Amino acid sequence: MRILDPHIHMTSRTTDDYEAMYASGVRVVVEPAFWLGQPRTGVGSFTDYFDSLLGWERFRAAQFGIRHHATIALNPKEANDPRCREVLAEIPRYLLKDGVVAVGEVGYDSMTPEEDEVFATQLQMAREAELPVLVHTPHRDKLAGTRRTLDVVVESGLPPERVLVDHLNETNVALVRDAGAWAGFSIYPDTKMDEDRMVAILQEYGTERMIVNSAADWGRSDPLKTAKTGHAMLAAGFSEDDVDQVLWRNPVAFYGQSGNLVLDPVPGFTEGAPPTPGVEFEGSSVLRGARA
Ligand SMILES: [Zn+2]
């Protein structure tokens, strides 16, 4: 099973997770920029975080044989703080950097006018940078939030095939599919969406434009939920090829639209061998010796 986890916050995960993910088949990840729990109070907190996603975390993942990419944006929650909105001026230059495969997570949290404006602005940034967009749907008022999200996407003029609408469930999957966008599902240990419900959705709607992620972060979550969903699909009678489409070819097709996805194995990586401080991985030479 080869897996691209298209939404996982590795910043908040351990090296044990990286090892277990590799063993389960994960070879490539995409880490969306998001809210860090503790509210940010200025632009510098964002730019240090973006630099860390594109530098340090990419290096850390490579030590475990995993290709790491990021999506960059001002997240919906912090769109409501004027001190945070100043980062919008910095985002366009980040969208040009290596390893950036989309604008995201953008969308709605509480559906305020400030969130409206920041969402529309970042959709235009994606158009200008010719990048796909990862859109977060709110966990409350999910159906209304998804409707409004899709309206704003249509207004932006972005083609729907460049948009992945995430954190879907049974209530809003049809809306997103009818709009022609990619449908993303975050599989959690005990809330929201699990692998058996995911299998039922795939049985009803098929495997085209369907994307599964673990969305693992510092909360109770499981970075192996992609592989577990693949095994649940096989147990329910889906073929290996169906699993490959959902866990690999679909996210590759979506983020591949950026032209920045790196899929080949990390040179010099051997499974089970502990990472050696100072070893130079491709694209990470700037961080050589960082552990010394
Ligand atoms: Zn997330």
Image (tube, grey):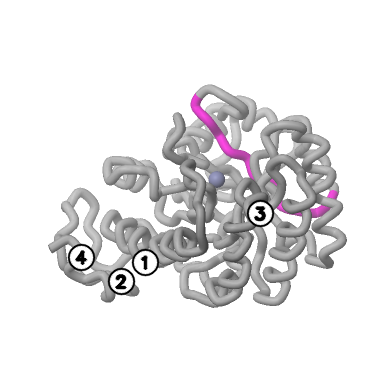
Under circle 4, the secondary element is loop
Q: Does the residue labelled 2 lie within 8 Å of ligand 1?
A: no
60 left or right, relative to 193: left
Give the quarter of the figure containing the C terminus: bottom left
| Residue 119 percent across, percent down from the top left | 73, 57
Say if 227 sits above or below 96 in the image: above
Specify the label residue 106 is tagged with: 3
Q: Mark 2 points at which residue?
A: 284
292 left or right, relative to 84: left
Q: Are marks 3 and 1 in contact (CB under 8 Å)?
A: no
Whichever of callouts 3 and 1 sits on the residue coming sooner in the sequence is 1
Location of residue 54 (image quadrant)? bottom left
Q: Mark 4 points at which residue?
A: 290
Specify the label residue 55 is tagged with: 1
Q: Nearer the viewer, mark 2 or mark 1?
A: 1
Instruction: Tell which quarter ligand 1 is in.
Output: top right
